[in-house]
Amino acid sequence: MEEGRLKIKVTVPPEGGKANQKIIELLSKALKVPKRDIDIVKGETSRIKVVRIEGVTLANLQEKLGVKVVKIS
């Protein structure tokens, strides 16, 4: 966590959405949710992204990732 954001670093190049797909795969595996339940809703071509994960609460994120989650309105 950095400045209220979860920081994920991938080594896959951003060409053709490959980096976005890798982020979705990593979150899917870490949170044990299907990839289809994870969407990048903002920032597909940016380094900073907003991700929606169906069926996962902030408490689940904190527990499964072992980080403190702060809700930003």
Image (tube, helix red, strand yellow):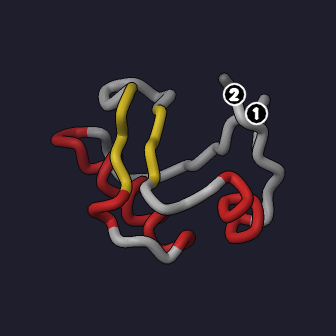
Q: Of the numbered discs in the image, which one, if any, rests on residue 4? A: 1
Q: Residue at x 31, y 26 (%)?
A: 45
Which of disc 1 and disc 2 is earlier in sequence? 1
Q: Residue at x 35, y 71 (%)?
A: 34
Residue nearest the viewer, comparing 53 with 44: 53
Q: Are marks 2 and 1 in contact (CB under 8 Å)?
A: yes
Q: Crowdedness of circle 2 by 10 Å Cα count: few (<14), some, many (20+)?
A: few
Instruction: Point out residue 8 in the picture as x, y percentages from the top left corner.
Output: 58, 49
Q: Which mark is residue 72?
A: 2
Q: Amino acid at mark 1?
A: Gly
Identify the residue at image location x=83%, y=51%: 68
Residue at 36% across / 33% down in the picture?
41
Alpha-carbon neighbours of circle 1 within 10 Å: few (<14), some, or many (≥20)? few
Coordinates of residue 4 in the picture (x, y in percent): 76, 33
Using the rendered view, name the quadrant where residue 38 is placed.
bottom left
| Left-right relation of 42 to 56 | left
Residue 65, quarter of picture: bottom right
Instruction: Give the residue type at disc 2.
Output: Ile
Farthest residue toward the left?
16
> Which disc is residue 61 wearing?
none
Horizontal side of 36 relative to 53 (left or right) equals left
Q: Quadrant of the N terminus?
A: top right
Q: Secondary structure at mark 2?
A: loop
For residue 40, what is the image quadrant? Answer: top left
Give the side of residue 41 with respect to residue 53, left or right. left
Looking at the rendered structure, the secondary structure element under dot 1 is loop
